[in-house]
C-alpha cells in the first residue's frame, strides 16, 4: 500500500512540475515571442520605472486592479497598485540617490495567456525576490499580481 501511495505521489509531482508541451514550430515561436515581450517589459519599463521613479512608465506594466503581497524588512506587506505607485512617486528614486540598483530576471514561465516571472531586485537596504504574475488580455502582457519577499543582505 505504501508503494502504491508513493508511486501516485511521485507521478502527481512529476506531472505538476513538467513544462507545458510545445507541439509545433508555431507554438515555439509564440512562446519565444511572448517570453521576449515579457523580458522587454521587465527590462525597459518595470526595472527602469523602479530605478528612475517613473510612475507612468512603471504603471504601464500593471493591470489597474493589481495587488501586491509579501514582506519587506521583516514586516507584512500589502498594497494596491495605486498605493504602490504613490509610494514610488513620493520617494527618492534609486537613480537620484546614487545608490546601487540591480534588477535581474531569473525565470519566465508561460502557459497560453498567463505567465510568471521570477525576478531579483536589489535597492537601498532591500534584497527582494519577486514573483510577478502576468496575463495577456487584449494582446498585451500586464502584471496582475506581485508577490515580494525581502531576504535581507
Image (tube, rainbow, N blue to C red):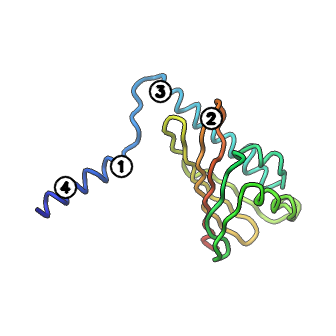
Q: Secondary structure at mark 2?
A: helix
Which mark is first along the chain, 4 or 3? 4
46 lies left or right of 86: left
Q: CA distance from mark 1 to mark 4?
A: 14 Å
Q: Secondary structure at mark 1?
A: helix
Q: Which residue carries the number 3 mark?
A: 27
- Disc number for residue 137: 2
Which mark is first along the chain, 2 or 3? 3
For the residue carrying disc 1, how many other residues have a C-alpha within 10 Å: few (<14), some (14-19), or many (20+)?
Answer: few
Q: CA distance from mark 3 to mark 1?
A: 21 Å
123 lies left or right of 11: right
Determine contact: label 4, label 2, CB under 8 Å: no
Of tags 1 and 2, which is closer to the observer? 2
Q: Which residue carries the number 4 mark?
A: 7
- Compared with residue 39, is residue 99 higher up or lower down, i.e. above or below? below
Determine contact: label 3, label 4, CB under 8 Å: no
Q: Quadrant of the N terminus?
A: bottom left
Q: Which residue carries the number 1 mark?
A: 16
Q: Where residue 24 appears, x then y in whole percent?
A: 42, 23
Which mark is first along the chain, 2 or 1? 1
Q: Secondary structure at mark 4?
A: helix
Of tags 3 and 1, which is closer to the observer? 1
Q: Where residue 136 appears, x then y in whole percent?
A: 61, 36
Q: Quadrant of the C terminus?
A: bottom right
- Compared with residue 61, is residue 27 higher up or lower down, i.e. above or below? above
Which mark is first along the chain, 4 or 1? 4
For the residue carrying disc 3, how many other residues have a C-alpha within 10 Å: few (<14), some (14-19), or many (20+)?
Answer: few
Determine contact: label 3, label 1, CB under 8 Å: no
Q: CA distance from mark 3 to mark 4?
A: 32 Å
Residue at coordinates 58% horizontally, 55% vertically from top-left? 131
Q: Where residue 19 appears, x then y in whole percent?
A: 40, 42
For the residue carrying disc 4, how many other residues have a C-alpha within 10 Å: few (<14), some (14-19), or many (20+)?
Answer: few
Amino acid at each position: 500500500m505504501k508503494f502504491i501511495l508513493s508511486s501516485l505521489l511521485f507521478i502527481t509531482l512529476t506531472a505538476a512540475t513538467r513544462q507545458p508541451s510545445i507541439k509545433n514550430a508555431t507554438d515555439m515561436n509564440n512562446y519565444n515571442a511572448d517570453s521576449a515581450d515579457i523580458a522587454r517589459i521587465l527590462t525597459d519599463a518595470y526595472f527602469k520605472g523602479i530605478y528612475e521613479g517613473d510612475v507612468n512608465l512603471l504603471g504601464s506594466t500593471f493591470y489597474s486592479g493589481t495587488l501586491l503581497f509579501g514582506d519587506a524588512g521583516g514586516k507584512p506587506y500589502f498594497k494596491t497598485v495605486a498605493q504602490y505607485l504613490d509610494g514610488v512617486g513620493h520617494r527618492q528614486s534609486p537613480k537620484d540617490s546614487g545608490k546601487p540598483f540591480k534588477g535581474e530576471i531569473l525565470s519566465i514561465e508561460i502557459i497560453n495567456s498567463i505567465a510568471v516571472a521570477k525576478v531579483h531586485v536589489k535597492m537601498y537596504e532591500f534584497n527582494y525576490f519577486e514573483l510577478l504574475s502576468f496575463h495577456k488580455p487584449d494582446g498585451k502582457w500586464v502584471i496582475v499580481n506581485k508577490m515580494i519577499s525581502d531576504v535581507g543582505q
